[in-house]
Image (tube, helix red, strand yellow):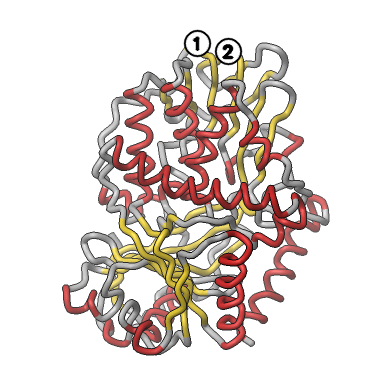
Amino acid sequence: MNTQTFPSASPVRRLEPAASWYRDSIAVDLHACPPLAGEVRADVCVIGGGITGLSTALHLAERGHAVTLLEAGEIGHGASGRSGGQILPGLGTDMATVEKALGREAARDVWEMSREAVRLTADLVERHAIPCELSWGYLHAAVKSRHVRELKAFRDRMARDYGYEALEWLEGDALRERVVTDVYPGALYEREAGHLHPLNYTLGLARAAQAAGGQLHEHSPALAIQRGPKPAVTTQAGRVRADYVVLATNAYQSGLVPELSGRVMRAANYMIATEPLTADQAARVLPHNDALSDANFVLDYYRLSASRRLIYGGEVSYDGREPRNLSARMDAKIARLFPSLQGVSIDYRWGGDVAITLNRAPDFGRLGANLFYAQGYSGHGMALAGLAGKLLAEAIGGQSERFDVFAAMPHRRFPGGRRLRLPLLLLATHFYKLRDRL
């Protein structure tokens, strides 16, 4: 544990996953997930031990399929076990993007399935008794007057075009009843959204998959996929022969499937956890235990844990290096939002990688008849990845209509090729960061 008090000007360092507060508050025990050894036969080989892969394994196993799951590190090593834990409907892009690509009717189907993703999360938590602190209530906060106009327009459009009535505009005293700060001119309150402990949720899915008969193997990175009518996946010490392969690696694809290279960019996000707040301190931050994100392009987000730690996330890096003065900048943001927390210690700092697509919509699809994939949630995957697993199981079971709605979304590679892709993305991000300040 690295404890300090904000604001701080301590040197930025590269943080290992072990620094995560989530890792120090695990409440779910798994059966052993030994590395794969030797050759095994399965109906389906799932590559990736995050929410997408685990939900796929669980739903397939419940349908009676023999499933072997390979995870390169530990279950929940990626964004699934290190994120802000927000559970909300919608995608990482505006529904207008989906309408333009697929039409209004299909966009409505996508929206309703995103709401189903939230309900599915709650159902999985209840059905499998996952101790993950699931709580409801979410604020989309405006930082400037432009955001006020955009958020109100979003509320009206979602009610008019999608029949979605779960958004309520708050400002003044009504807003301060839910978040005690003077920084935001207003916010949309969303009662169908919420938050949870992401690693315990992910581990809970793994435990449920094991109970349903799924075979999980940690420290078993997939080194190659042999394509064809009877595919096989090779690891350092083993091999899985299967009828189907599901690629659920998101930001960690590592060139396994060349056709997907360049369709997502890996981006790092950063988080902190304070020491546990007193009940009075928590009441002067988020009195109703809502989660919150602001409306900037490079957004900040936060919530309280059940132990009343403030879990705060933000900032972004695309080049694998932590942003300059990261700790001081994040600490200063908290101090500006909540002066009442002056002197509260920061107990944990960590980072995690997400996969973003060019249009910020998730990228689902199949390559040939028996290789499926789901990736690119663009920071919006905690609920949607669980639904992706259910849809993948449906598709492998012969009912692909719902999966195909998402798969119809067109995706392009990031421009610039291998050499110019990152510089062009950094330039675009710099533009949006400047726009956030206006």
- Label 2 amino acid? Arg
Residue 392 visible in the displayed image: yes
In this orientation, which residue lies closer to the viewer: 98 or 18? 98
Q: Residues within 10 Å of mark 2 (few under 14, many from 20)?
A: many
Q: Position of residue 388 (x, y in %)?
A: 54, 39
Q: Quadrant of the C terminus?
A: bottom right
Q: 364 or 38, which is in the foreground?
A: 364
The residue most toward the left is 279
Q: Is residue 216 above or below residue 305?
A: above
Q: Position of residue 309 (x, y in %)?
A: 26, 66
Q: Secondary structure at mark 1?
A: strand
Task: Please tell me which residue lies in front, 432 or 128.
Answer: 128
Tell me whether the residue at label 2 lies in contact with that at label 1, contact meaning CB atoms closer than 8 angstroms: yes
Q: Secondary structure at mark 2?
A: strand
Which residue carries the number 1 mark?
A: 40
The residue pinned by badge 2 equals 241
- Split into 4 quadrants, where in the image is the N terminus? bottom left
As drawn, the label of residue 83 is: none
258 lies left or right of 13:
right
